[in-house]
Amino acid sequence: MGKKIKKEVEPPPKDVFDPLSVESKKAATVVLMLTSPEEEVLSKACEALYKFAAKGEENKLTLLELGALEPLFKLVTHEDPVVRRNATMVLGIMASHNDVKKSLRQLDVTSAFIARLAPEEDVVIHEFASLCLVHMAVEYNSKVQIFEQGGLEPLIRLLGSPDPDVKKNCVECIYNMVQDFQSRAAIRELNVIPPLLDLLKSDYPIIQLLALKTLGIISIDRETRVMLREHQGLDHLFKILETKEFNDLHVEALGVVANCLEDVDTMQLIQETGGLRKLLAFAEVSTLTDFQKNAAKAIAKAAYEPENRKILNEQEVEKCLVTLLGTDNDGTKIAASQAISAMCENLASKQTIGTLGIPQLVQLLSSDNEEVKEAAATAVVNLTTAHLGNASAVAEADGIEPLISLLSAKRDGAVASAATVLTNLAIQEPLRLSIQSHGIMTAIVEPLHSTNSIVQSRAALAVAAIGCDADARTELRNSGGLEPLVKLLHSKHDEVRRNACWAVMVCAGDVLTAAEMTRLGALDILEDINLSIGRKNNFSEAALDKILDHNLPQKYSQMGFLTSSNIIADGFYDYGQVKPGVKLLSLEELSTQELNDHRAIILIYAKSPELEVAAPPVPAEEKSQEAPSARVGSSVSSTTRKISRERASSVEDKPESPGRSSSISKGSSREKGSRKGKGKKEEEKPKEEEIEPVMPKIVEEVPEKALWFPPVDSILMDYITEVSKTILPLATTKEQVVALAQFVADKMGGPIERDRLHEFSWELHISEIEFELKCNVVPVGKINKGTFYHRALLFKVLADRIGIGCSLVHGEYNRGWNEVKLVDDSPLGIPGLLLPPQVYIVDLMYQPGNLMKEGSPESDHYRRI
């Protein structure tokens, strides 16, 4: 081990130059002697130049500048062996200088030096020719030249040279060459494995080290690993690992073993011979941090193969990895975390590591080293994915707080992994609530702003997982998280866009959040996405539908349908069908438009009069300018509106009477003046007393800004009251549906014969109402002659008020219909036999109350002309 490689010619001290002096002019004289025809002069000159060049890099450069390189190269092929030897020695030692190497490449010297490796050449020529090739093989073009000129074969042959310097130079040159894949493939065919394994027995550590380095490179290829196994290479490697005196070679030997572990056959062989158990034991007790780190890396590489994971699990590799997590070296912690990530593909390993290692991994999440935090977070991702027990263990180890802190980490990988772990934990409601209590929605805003697509995707997914709670949505909205979330809808990355749509869909679960996202442009972006075949995804349509659920007029006009869960509230209006991307004007804007010949806009507004506060008195001059019925709607001050809302809230919060709808009207209409309510007097009296004290203040205040709201549809209020009294108490849903259909038809012109439908002049009737109101907006209660879509709308409104689930669909050519789900009676007459509900179309025109089964010819005819 401790021996030094012999040198054929020992360089003299730097202060000696014999027979020439050190002066450059003397060196120049010797260079001139290289052209002498006398062999003895040539030999002496080369010998002198070797001694001069051996003194340092400056002297090598001096010789280059004096033009010694070209004549020396010519002497490399001289017929006299002594001249040839001495010239090769000079160039071999000079080749370490970068400028000299550059000039040698220009002279194309590789073939000449390869020729000097021939068996008949002197061993000293072998040494210095191979040394020159070592320096040349550092550069890619020279590697190619050596390869193409057949240099590998003589280099491999000389690995068996009796001279250690020749062995050292040849194995080093081969090591440089095999960095290129072409040389790796060729060297395998030249049977390089046996001589390299022999070099592992060398007495010289440098030779052993270079042999191991070379084996480490060429064992990347599977075919070479097979050859290594066939030549009992693993025995040589484990012999080194088991020898304490060779601890300086342990890391390189482990590198070769690590490559071999990738093959299942080799892994099985190592396991059967007890080598794997030894390797894990070495890793746990080794004092070499690089060895421990590389051992963890070897396990990680091997664990990518399912069969290897099984073998490693049988050898209880998890205990070793958890031990390595506790070392003081950050590199080892990172490698162990990465190995744990790979082993988590094995369910048994995931379970074992979760039990043993989660507390330590949670501690590493707070490490000062950013790479350690990232590796630990990635390991926790794999441990908690599809494993509820490990997710709970992370929370029990107080992992939620450091995970949320990681959302502001410097490394994108750490941020993405932290978001993913939190998403995994959020599957369990108690953990989700705990995560929310730590301010997750505030912390997630920064990752949503990230420019890294993986971070964006994982952050959006976390929002989707946690945003199902109302408090979480409020926190996200108040923290400014909706704006970056909506911007992610523009992403060109499919996964980012998909997860952003998912998060938007979840967050649109309440009115305020949906309204804010609409203001930020989410509606427009989603509509654009859904028009694109390439960008549309499973969640984009659902997200659009969810946002539109809080803007039912837009949804009905754009989508052409309302589901049973879309409850029509006061302020809804049917504008008619519009194309995607067309935004409806507000009801106020539509009400102030000049009368036109466009389709009438049907208004739903039946608020109880006690929920409205009278507007301040209108000056006489204003009254004279416009009749009360000239425009739909009126204005109040913002203060009045605020009190009206408070009053409405106090009334709506009261419990409903049994069998009554909370929306039943009890008061007066603005259009028809004061009417006595139908409720009890003792119920009305306190309401009047409540409002009176604040009225003088309202009148005295100066309005900040006039707010518009629609007029009350007193006829619709009466409809609601009537159906609540007469239809709501009916025993079955089917009876309610039939009765309601007959009620609606009766209010809108009665049954119509199919062949006389064209005589039903509903258009003229609607035009007369518009002319009467001087407005394009028509309250639904005013319509006495309504066609399909008028009747379907009224049916949906009344059904929603008394709790009948039904959808509303807008067809073509003024068609509209309602769909209800009813459970048929058991065809076998078996009591308690539950059948799936059937969808029926409700006839409101021809035979009001007739229920037509979905898909039947009768229902198809009803929906089409």
Image: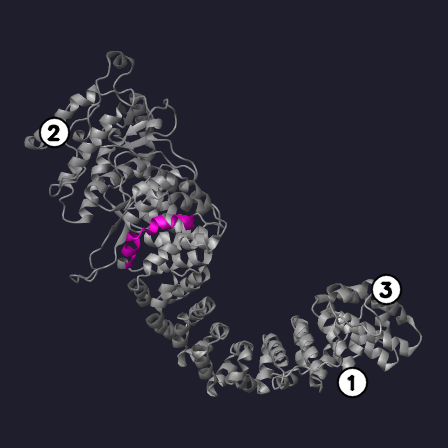
Question: Does residue 356 appear left or right of residue 617 in this picture?
Answer: right
> Is 447 in the magenta?
yes
Q: Residue furthest left?
A: 682
Is 161 located above or below residue 14 in the figure? below
Q: Mark 2 = which residue?
A: 690
Q: Position of residue 181 (x, y in %)?
A: 65, 71
> Is 396 in the magenta?
no
* Type of the residue with mark 3: Lys
Residue 403 location, quadrant: bottom left
- Per the image, label 2 sits on a secondary structure element best described as helix
Residue drawn at x 53%, y 80% is 247
* Type of the residue with mark 2: Glu
Q: How many marks?
A: 3
Residue 150 location, quadrant: bottom right
Q: Position of residue 60 (x, y in %)?
A: 77, 67
Relative depth, front residue between 166 and 382? 166
Is 429 located above or below residue 351 in the figure? above
Residue 660's tag is none
Is 518 located above or below residue 11 in the figure? above
Highlighted range, magenta: 431-448
- Mark 2 to mark 3 CA distance (whole Å): 118 Å
Q: Mark 3 = which residue?
A: 25
- Colouring chosen for the image of the structure: one colour
- Mark 3 to mark 1 CA distance (whole Å): 39 Å
Relative depth, front residue between 314 and 792? 314
Q: Mark 1 = which residue?
A: 119
State whether the magenta stretch is mostly helix, strand or loop. helix
Q: Position of residue 613 (x, y in %)?
A: 19, 26
* Type of the residue with mark 1: Pro
Specify whether residue 210 is in view: yes
Tell me the quadrant of the picture where the N terminus can be found: bottom right
Residue drawn at x 27%, y 14% is 622
